[in-house]
Amino acid sequence: MPILSKPSAAAKTSLYYITAGSLLGIWSGIWYWYMRQHPPTSDVPYFFCWGFLLTGVTLLVIGFALGRISRAARDAELPPEEVTAAAAQAEQTAAARAPIMAPMNPAMPMMGNGMMPNAPVAQPIAGNPIVAPVQAPSPRGR
């Protein structure tokens, strides 16, 4: 059953949060270091820099927490052992009853060109020769 084998998307989401938080933290740190070397005329750039830095740290914390929660909840996502055993037995029973695809006539295998070996070849009809139609000359004289 596909529901028993579907992995959780929490690990992938955790990686996205950790990646986004790391990138925001790194670039905010670079921006803060630049502003310390070249002070801006107002406090607005510092406001945005600290906002991005704290957003990055928050995303990092969420990513790490989500990864830890998803590892802890992995056992809770699986069905009870009785259901798992019953599902495995149902899959084995279904595989045993699967239809077998056999050739139409195994005693007469097909050749590579789609013809059967020793099959009679169609002959043309003797009393009806194939003749091309004759065209009448044009009345205009060419």
Image (spheres, rainbow, N blue to C red):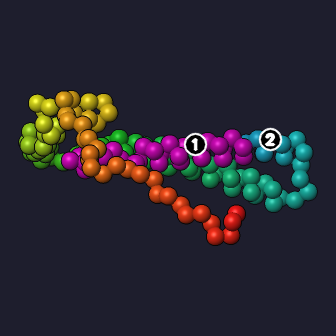
| Other residues around mark 1 within 10 Å, as few (<14) / some (14–19) / many (≥20) | some
x%, y% of residue 142?
70, 63
Q: Looking at the image, which is closer to me, 108 or 103?
A: 108
User: Looking at the picture, which amino acid does disc 1 mark?
Assistant: Thr
- Is 87 located above or below residue 135 in the figure? above
Check residue 107 for magenta coloring. no
What's the mark number on residue 64? none
Report whether residue 38 is seen. yes
Q: Is residue 75 left or right of residue 57?
A: left
Q: Which residue is mark 2?
A: 33
Q: Which of label 1 and label 2 is nearer to you?
A: 1
Q: Quadrant of residue 27?
A: top right
Residue at the (60%, 47%) spot, across then down:
20
User: Looking at the picture, which amino acid does disc 2 mark?
Assistant: Trp
What's the mark number on residue 19? 1
Check residue 18 for magenta coloring. yes
Q: Quadrant of residue 106?
A: top left
Report whether residue 82 is seen. no
- Is 113 located above or below residue 93 in the figure? above
Q: Main secondary structure of the magenta part?
A: helix
Q: Point out the stretch of residues depicted in magenta.
A: 1-28
Q: Is residue 119 left or right of residue 65?
A: left
Between the C-alphas of marks 1 and 2, the distance is 21 Å
Going from N to C along the chain, the mark reached first, 1 or 2, is 1
Query: Of helix, strand and loop, which one carries label 2?
Result: helix
Residue at the (57%, 51%) spot, across then down:
58
Query: Of helix, strand and loop, which one carries label 1?
Result: helix
x%, y% of residue 63?
49, 46
